[in-house]
Image (tube, rainbow, N blue to C red):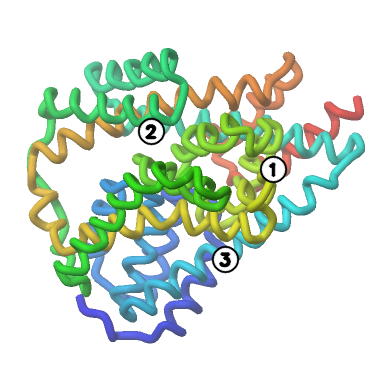
Amino acid sequence: MRSGQGTPGEVFAAFLKLGVTSFGGPIAHLGYYRDELVVRRKWLSESAYGDLVALCQFLPGPASSQVGFALGMMRAGWLGALAAFVAFTLPSALLMVIFALVAVNLSGPVAMGVLHGLKIVAVAVVAQAVMGMAKNLCPDKERAAIAVSAVAVLAVLPTAFGMVGAIMLGAVLGLLLGRGSGNTSGGAIFSVVSRPIAIAALGCWLGLLVVLPLIAGQSAGLSLFDGFYRAGSLVFGGGHVVLPLLQAETVEQGWVTEHQFLAGYGAAQALPGPLFTFAAYLGAVKSGEPNGIFGAVLALAAIFAPGYLVLVGTLPFWDRFRTMARAQSLMQGANAAVVGILGAALYSPVFTGGIHDLKDLALGLLCFVLLTAWMKPPWMVVIVAALGGILLEVA
């Protein structure tokens, strides 16, 4: 599979269509990609697509956006990768920035009801994510115990450092558990990335992860970039996992209020495209400079950068690395810990920030049942929650 089969313009048009129609979160995005690019356009084979998805789900970062970036690169080189990222991300990011700029001026019972409903629907969305991830990533008692141990770590150390420690503990326990088989499926990934470029990308990712905290105090812009870059570097297991990481980097830093955070997260559920554009909203509403449009762009670049650097750095080596049983065991433990981290976030700040009485709980349960039993799309459930929030506010 080589680049040069298409043009950046072709890639941009294809991913812009996906960016405005791909509702439902990362797993749904992968289905949209397959239908549009594998089945209809035949850009690559089913086996190659499956192997690419496996790689991006293994790495830290936004899996669906990483798959899109790689598909753009394979179709039209580096410009194709950039076109795929911009086209898929821009619609959602623009809508989140507009919401951020408008939300600060909202007042009155209707507006407050909508914002309250958005916080309540976040409870249902995160609960659904925890349930689905626990089923897939904690299928046995040992990995369920790893998830619980991650919650215990956060109970003692409820900070970003506690999350890092929980993931590292999970990785070590997974390695000791040794459930990786070394078996793989799918074909090889033929990358347009050379090994020197890959090594440089990995060095850049690791270097920024180490250096940014040391220089973050020199300016507010560096501090913001550091926080969002660290959050983007630690996301394993799905887009919703970014919630506790961003909460630690923004709410606990005093950059945004818990009310702003949960309202923005709820609004993000109604939009197409990647959940990571929630960072654009947070950068825009941040108290103190940089904020507004510049803060949104800086936060967006920072949260996406590590996932793409790791992806570029891994592509040439993936076919060998994926067959290593120890690597699989390590990631199984890390992913189990991620379930615990998201479960802790479901309690605080999501549940404690959105549910205040039995009426709120009833609306939250309605949203959860609509998502899980009735299988309604998230954007529809967000509308129900917003209307319910208005009724609760004016009643």
Q: Position of residue 321 (x, y in %)?
A: 11, 50
| Amino acid type, callout 2 | Met
Residue drawn 66% across and 52% down?
A: 291
* Marks 1 and 3, the one that precedes in the sequence: 3
Q: Position of residue 239 (x, y in %)?
A: 45, 44
Q: CA distance from mark 3 to mark 2?
A: 28 Å
Q: Which residue is mark 3?
A: 90
How crowded pointer 1 is (Cα within 10 Å; few <14, some 14-19, many 20+) is rated as: some
Quadrant in which the C terminus appears: top right
Q: Which residue is mark 1?
A: 287
Disc ID at residue 133: 2
Q: Position of residue 297 (x, y in %)?
A: 57, 60
| Amino acid type, callout 1 | Ser
How crowded pointer 2 is (Cα within 10 Å; few <14, some 14-19, many 20+) is rated as: many
Q: Nearer the viewer, mark 3 or mark 2?
A: 3
Q: CA distance from mark 1 to mark 3?
A: 23 Å
* Marks 3 and 2, the one that precedes in the sequence: 3
* 342 w.r.t. 224: above or below: above
Q: Secondary structure at mark 2?
A: helix
Count up the numbered dots. Answer: 3
Q: Quadrant of residue 335?
A: top left
